[in-house]
Amino acid sequence: MEKRVVFRSAWLPYALVAPQIAITIVFFFWPAMQAVWYSFQLQDAFGLKSQFVGLQNFANLFRDGNYLASFKVTAIFSVLVAFFGLAISLLLATMADRVLRGALAYKTLLIWPYAVAPAIAGVLWAFLFAPSIGIVTYVLKGFGVDWNWIINDNQALTLVVIASVWKQISYNFLFFLAGLQSIPRSLIEAAAIDGAGPTRRFWTVVFPLLSPTTFFLLVVNIVYAFFDTFGVIDATTQGGPAQATQILVYKVYHDGVKAADLGGSSAQSVILMFIVIALTVAQFRFIERRVQY
Amino acid sequence: MVENRPGLTVLSHALLILGVLLIAFPLYVTFVASTHSLERIMQVPMPLLPGDRLVENYSQVLTGGTTTGSKAAVGRMLVNSTVMALAIPLGKITISIISAFAIVYFRFRLRMFFFWMIFITLMLPVEVRIIPTFKVIADLGMLNTYAGLTVPLIASATATFLFRQFFMTVPDELAEAARVDGAGPMRFFWDVLLPLSKTTMAALFVIQFIYGWNQYLWPLLITTDESMYTTVIGIKRMIVGSDAANEWNLIMATAILAMLPPALVVVLMQRWFVRGLVETEK
């Protein structure tokens, strides 16, 4: 789509895009190219000399059990976050779409966690589940569950999943509610006249019509689990215990900033860039479908 | 509602109330913890009703931080967070609206090239270029500065697209009339486009305020000086060791202070917030 009426100026359009383009080059393209460059380099222990080693950093990564384990952790983590995040918010949105009284109050009370930073969500839940003083830990002990996420890997993963899902429910809820409200009432009424009960109507009419929203949210939630949950993990488990919660983004940070392994960390960055590109393409394809619908 | 099923309505309300309570539970415990002395919090189980130390705890963190962890004053951090939360949306809106204006209302060489350059930034989040971006900031001498905290985050493909999309819906007759009346491009921008874009700007502002306030990885990388910590980073610096070694009452008071401004923005500006959220994702 193009405008019919345009202005003419030899220099003005360049001046107008200049600030955006300058920031893009200095802080996006230049560092990204450096990441690619470093990923082909091997530095000595003091960071004084580096030599070109081709794809060796990548080969090392795929031989490194820790890196492969990090892939597995990321996959499990993002599937859990996306599944529970979507399921809980779809249930709440369906209920909020039904009720007449108090709909706005419910909405307001459900969306505020969007405003909470992931790191703070992590701190809140880490406190609730704190091994010695946490209130939830205390209740669990009453049920005979010994909770200590500092040493137990499954419990650590559970903690970061809960904190991440809790923060993301509000976002999913808003999109599901908007999706539900755009479904024509006449379709639901027709199904009701044909004798379909609420459950049947949901699975045969509402859920299929909602699928574009669901696909869109699925991609958004996976992106969220991959990247935005960095704060949750850094503020709680820091990838531990024994890398049980070390997702890919956290490993890039850990290897690059804490372990100062420039080549390895950059190679991981490059792999992550490919993942982001794949996810962005997926996101745009689903959004196109959503618009058609 | 299609038919009257009282049972189902009761169930809906019950589930919604359960959802609201589960969502609010961590917030409530956080608030309660922020109003007690450390000794009371360390008792297992901790009290579930607010205590009497609200004023002491909050004034302690605002002026002096914690005693075992970071001693940086949270008052200063709130100022830093506010700077980030205001500078990022203002910067983003400014540079995005002018670049969208150029791309929609002018024909010039490299126009599509610039458009794609902006688009590709979507695929380069900070998380995937941590070390080299840090180096760039260090080389430019922007560590521990407000410019370093905000400028790299104001480039935005989504905001540019949003304005571009909006400008495409503005009738061509307006630009034509402006030209016939002898108005130049910048005059048209100020007097016609900018007033029309107000709602889009408001919606973007709300979303970007929250984005700026909640930044974590970026300030974590480039602030080493306590006086430049943002509130979210400050909390992380207060946690020093195993769970019993932390001053949880003070940490929780800081958490409340860190959550309050963005939460108020979401609740009070709900209409703009929902609109901004839905539109920036299109």
Image (cartoon, rainbow, N blue to C red):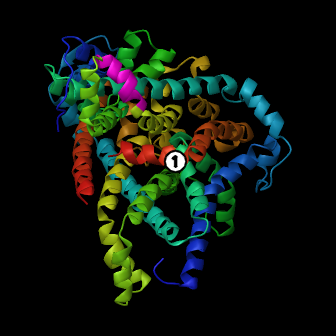
Image coordinates for residue A16, horizontal then vertical, percent = 29, 17
Question: In this picture, which residue range is highlighted in magenta?
Answer: B184-195
On what subunit does the disc labeled 1 rest?
B
Q: Nearer the viewer, residue A111 or B204?
A: B204
The structure residue drawn at horizontal position 41% and vertical position 56%, both measured from the top left corner, is A175
The structure residue drawn at horizontal position 41% and vertical position 44%, both measured from the top left corner, is A246
Q: Nearer the viewer, residue B24 or A286?
A: A286
In the rendered image of this protein, does residue A100 appear above or below residue A167?
below
Please tell me whether mark 1 sits on a helix, a strand or a loop.
helix
Image coordinates for residue A291, horizontal then vertical, percent = 26, 54
Image coordinates for residue B66, horizontal then vertical, percent = 72, 30
Q: Residues within 10 Å of mark 1 (few under 14, many from 20)?
A: few
Is B191 included in the stretch rendered in magenta? yes
In the rendered image of this protein, does residue B241 appear above or below residue B92?
below
The amino acid pointed to by label 1 is Arg
Dominant secondary structure (helix, strand or loop) of the stretch shown in magenta: helix
Q: Which residue is mark 1?
A: B271
Q: Nearer the viewer, residue A21 or A49?
A: A21
The structure residue drawn at horizontal position 51% and vertical position 48%, both measured from the top left corner, is B271
